[in-house]
Image (cartoon, rainbow, N blue to C red):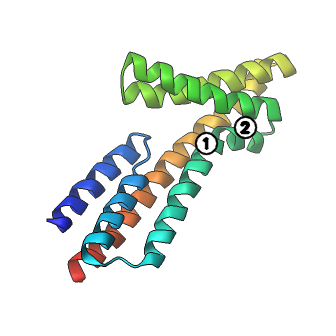
């Protein structure tokens, strides 16, 4: 029963991560349920999973900012990309849940960074180049988060099946 629940939670976690939500926390939940019910995985594994969850959230929150910075944008454009992504995700969710969330996050980050850099530089080509940094960073984080969720799920389910 615990293994079936863990498989379900890990599957849902993977789906959520692929859709730009925080699936890593569901894998941690599955690991906690298993640890309290079956006595494994170990406390060390639970701590590593928790740290990975926190690191993923921090990295995801900073992705737009870091993408702008990597392309030579201003700190203000980085902050604008961060907040533009949050606002865009909220608006996108209201319009069309899941797909709208991802599209809104990307469009909001791009739009806010572009506008900020266009006002600063007065050159749309350079502003667009900088703003694309936030798009690529957000897509990279989506890929990394999904891969991390998959890795955590494989680790947990392997431990559960072989124990």
Q: What number is the disc on residue 110?
A: none
- Where disc 2 sits, the SS reads helix
Residue 21 in the image, given as x and y percentages of width and height: 43, 41
Residue 51 in the image, given as x and y percentages of width and height: 55, 63
105 to the left or right of 124: left
* Corner quadrant of residue 79: top right
Note whether 77 is above or below 42 in the view shown: above
Quadrant of the snapshot with the N terminus: bottom left
* Residue at the bottom extreme, as displayed: 163
- Name the residue tied to disc 1: 61
Quadrant of the snapshot with the C terminus: bottom left
The residue positioned 50% from the left and 27% from the top of the image is 89
Residue 101 in the image, given as x and y percentages of width and height: 44, 28
Note whether 76 is above or below 19 in the view shown: above
Mark in the foreground, 2 or 1: 1
- Where disc 1 sits, the SS reads helix
* Corner quadrant of residue 128: top right
* Residue at the right extreme, as displayed: 121
The residue positioned 74% from the left and 34% from the top of the image is 78
Residue 57 in the image, given as x and y percentages of width and height: 55, 49
Q: Earlier in the sequence, mark 2 or mark 1?
A: 1
Q: What separation in Å lies between label 2 and label 1 (alpha carbons)?
A: 13 Å
The local crowd at label 2, few if under 14, some if 14 to 19, many if 20 or more residues have their Cα within 10 Å, is many
Note whether 142 is above or below 156 in the view shown: above
- Name the residue tied to disc 2: 68
* Residue at the left extreme, as displayed: 1
């Amino acid at each position: 029963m615990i293994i079936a629940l863990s498989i379900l939670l890990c599957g849902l976690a993977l789906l959520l991560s692929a859709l730009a939500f925080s699936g890593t926390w569901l894998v941690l939940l599955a690991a906690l349920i298993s640890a309290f019910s079956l006595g494994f995985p170990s406390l060390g594994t639970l701590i590593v999973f928790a740290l990975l969850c926190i690191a993923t959230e921090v990295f995801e929150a900073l992705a737009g900012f870091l993408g702008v910075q990597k392309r030579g944008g201003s700190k203000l454009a980085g902050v604008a990309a961060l907040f533009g992504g949050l606002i865009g995700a909220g608006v996108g969710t209201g319009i069309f849940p899941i797909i709208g969330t991802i599209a809104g996050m990307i469009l909001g980050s791009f739009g806010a960074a572009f506008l900020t850099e266009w006002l600063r530089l007065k050159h749309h080509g350079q502003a667009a180049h900088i703003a694309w940094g936030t798009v690529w960073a957000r897509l990279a984080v989506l890929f990394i988060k999904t891969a991390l969720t998959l890795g955590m799920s494989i680790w947990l389910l392997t431990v559960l099946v072989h124990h």
